[in-house]
Image (tube, rainbow, N blue to C red):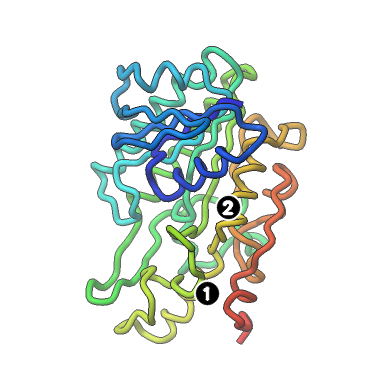
Amino acid sequence: MHVVITGAAGNLGSKLNALLERAEWCSAVTALDIVPVTAGKKTTGVLADVADADDQRWRVPVAKADAIVHFATANPWPDGNWAESTKSFDMTANLLAVAGTERHCRFVFASSNHAMGGYKDHPIPGDGKIRMTTPARSGTRFFIPGEGYHYGAPYGATKIMGERATLARARESRGMVSGIALRIGWCQGGVNDPRTVNSSGKPGEPVGQPADEMARDYRWFRNMWLSNADYERLMTAVLTSGTDRWPGPGIIVPGVSNNRTTAWALDETRAWTGYDPQHDIWTELGLDPSA
């Protein structure tokens, strides 16, 4: 399998690249970014801007790829503005227009928990689990000490549109594209210590936030934790699984660890991709989530 990674120099892109360098089922990696990516045994780093629809440096490998994992974004942080978010969607649209034009392609769109982050402060309909069919609700509210409240509405809205575009391309591709919109949880850089997961991503309690909000935020964000090992299990599953169990040519699934009280419907991810997460943040922290 020849895999193209966009945003390959970033946190998730570099972690995936390291996995693919070891994976027997991957024969070659094209690592696209606007900054240099170090070449590897399988990896070819390519400087290219996927926001430029005419840039042949990315168009050629994308057309020939067996799989594409799209991480690239104009601003990787959830407080990105509308201009940055619009540019991010342009990247997704450009890639989808080329993917699957020469051979079948598995297109994995790196969506985000922020596509549904509005449910942090609102009841989740149905069985209380966020599923593929749950109505979208972007705009996570999160608190950063010294800065106050931030809202991820533009960032989340772009992820929602990317999800819909991925499903639309898969549906109209006549079998040339199988699409997965992957709502990736909180996989921090480096060792990904679960103790630093809170509303701000910084160690320690977010001083200045009301206690009831703080407790709710801790639970919400901790339940989105995705360990490094589970991240590798997730990416292996979404890149290598067949489509025979999918409800259609494209699916939307969450990607978090096996956190006991998570709101994300991992039963769908398990059933459709075979993902088998092993870690639970509450066990890692030695905490009772019901306390």
Residue corresponding to mark 2: 231
Q: Nearer the viewer, residue 45 or 195?
A: 45
33 is higher (above) or lower (below) than 137: above
Q: Which of 275 and 159 is in front in this view?
A: 275
Residue at image position (57%, 19%) is 173
User: How far from the left and from the top, in percent, is residue 289?
Assistant: 61, 80
Is 43 left or right of 146, judged from the image as shown?
Answer: right
Is 209 left or right of 14, judged from the image as shown?
Answer: left
Label 1, residues with CA under 10 Å away: few <14, some 14-19, many ≥20? some
Q: Do the residues labelled 2 and 1 touch (CB within 8 Å)?
A: no
Observer able to see residue 170 = no
Quarter holding the N terminus is top right
Observer able to see residue 237 = yes
User: How far from the left and from the top, in percent, is residue 91?
Assistant: 36, 31
Residue at image position (32%, 84%) is 207
Label 2, residues with CA under 10 Å away: few <14, some 14-19, many ≥20? many
Quarter holding the C terminus is bottom right
